[in-house]
Image (spheres, rainbow, N blue to C red):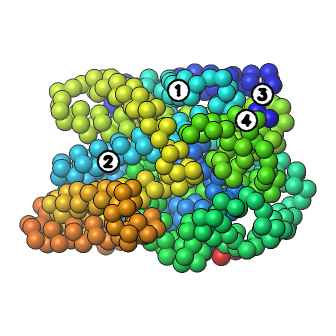
Amino acid sequence: MNDLSIIDLSVIVIYLVGIIVYGISKSKRSGSEDYFLGGRTMTWPIVGIALFSANISSSTLVGLASDAYQTNVHVYNYEWMAVIILIFFSIFFLPFYLRSKVYTMPEFLERRYDRRSRYYFSMITVIGNILVDTAAGLYVGKIVLSLLFPEISSTVILVILAVAAAAYTIPGGLNSVIQTEVIQAILLIIGSCLITYFAFDQLGGGWDAMMAGLDGLLQSGDVDFAERIESGKHIPSDSSEVFSLVRPSNDEFMPWWGLLTGVPLLGFYFWANNQFMVQRVLGAKDLNHGRWGALFAGLLKLPVILIMVVPGVLALLLFHGLDISELNYVLTDGSICNDLANCPNLTYPVLLFKLLPTGILGLVVAGLMAAMMSSVSATFNSASTLVTMDFIRNIKPDFTSKQLVYAGQITTVILVILAIAWVPFIERVSDSLWTYLQLVIAYTSPPAVATFILGLFWKRANANGSIVSLVSGFFLALFAIFSQVFDWVPFINDLHFLAIATWLFIISVIIHAVVSLATSAPPQQQVDEYTYKRSIYKAETEELKGVKWYHNFRILAIILLIITAIIVISLW
């Protein structure tokens, strides 16, 4: 099943070599601003597609298909919620980010608070980049290449993937990353559409046939659900329940209260605070292009349910009970995976190998590998930006712009090694890649989200409140993790991870507020320059008078909200 023809292999090799050469040719490295932010020249289509591509990476593709195979179609809630977050981000936070001319999100925290918050958040973000974005991307690449070349060891595969992604990131910087992301996003969308088309074609019908088949499978008590039944997990009763985005309060994956509280927190961190994503908008040529690009990325997120989630459901109908031992995929315990019920992360690769014809298979596999390279190269660049601009530049203030670029390149090499070392632990944490990604963010992001929101909207928030809440939130998260590992506190162990994220956020807000009120007020300059005021809204209203509707970000945001509402209501 996983043998590739000479044509497919040729397509993959030609594409990967071509994208590396193209990335290097688009490098901008005359100075630190060129290298780390692409010279701040990105137009809105480039910004939007780069945001979408960096988010809908190989790990997201595999994660969405995996959870959809397990009938967790409400994983789409993370996708449409991103639209709400991007609108909020573009209206309130982005103007401050671009006006301040910062390179990094931690640098912005220093402007609003002090250097302590900057160093802490930079360290946490770099760790998160390695554990979440980089390692997850390499993990997906390892899955695919292990299926194609089972005789090659995982370590060798990881090294090859990391070197390929770093090949144009190290010399080219952000401009190389973004220019290649645009091409890869287009190929990714085309590949996802092809997967969906061929899956529906093999099923022998359209949407109605899928829903009818799903009803029959759910009522048959199929063996694929045996493990879920034994563990006490909920099994949906029919197809309408599978495609219902709003779940009951006891749902083990995403209860309705988690959709209202935890999901926005995780999304806000990912889109508005995470250097990995925000760096693309920081490279926008001006505020309008940054805003339009963010809204465009939100629009691109909406069709994800059709081309990236639905294929996982179709895989359940087409391949449940399929013996996949011939793939020779080795689990962490040394055994060979024999069905998708036990190895849901293989859902997307099985769709590729079973459905796509020669030539197209090579192109889509190349697209998947390109998506992996895109996300990995993006995290390499963002993490090296953090280390270079938040630590090295402060330790060595006499460094020239070119010396900072060299430091960023050396940092990237070190990050490559660390990410490769972490990949084997991912499968041990969770059998669902998507769950792994959300778990890490749920434990690390709430204190940061509290600090950013209070900093922008509360004038009294000060540096002491920021650092105390950040550090306290970190240790509370560690306590919650160790409690679950060593069974310390049953109450905490029974909490849903979205509930833990919500409580960490609430506690961080309270600590931040109490400490800020108990200590001196922040300098007036910080308040004037980095907190939102009604006068900003009034000034923007005046600027928008006479602006054509398709250039007015407020009108565009309202249109995007209406489209999102229609989709969500139809899947309620």
The vertical placement of 352 against 358, above or below, is below
Q: Position of residue 351 (x, y in %)?
A: 76, 45
Give the quarter of the image for residue 418. top left
Q: Are marks 3 and 1 in contact (CB under 8 Å)?
A: no
> Is 380 placed left or right of 302 in the picture?
left
- Mark 2 or mark 4: whose residue is earlier in sequence: 2
The residue that label 2 is drawn on is 124
Mark yes or no: residue 418 visible: yes
Mark 1 residue element: helix
Q: Residue 327 carries which label?
A: 4
Mark 3 is surrounded, within 10 Å at the Cα level, by few (under 14), some (14 to 19) or many (20 or more) other residues, namely some
Q: Position of residue 391 (x, y in %)?
A: 24, 37
Q: Label 4, label 1: how many angstroms apart (C-alpha)? A: 18 Å
The residue that label 3 is drawn on is 4
> Is 317 placed left or right of 102 in the picture?
right
Q: Position of residue 36 (x, y in %)?
A: 38, 35
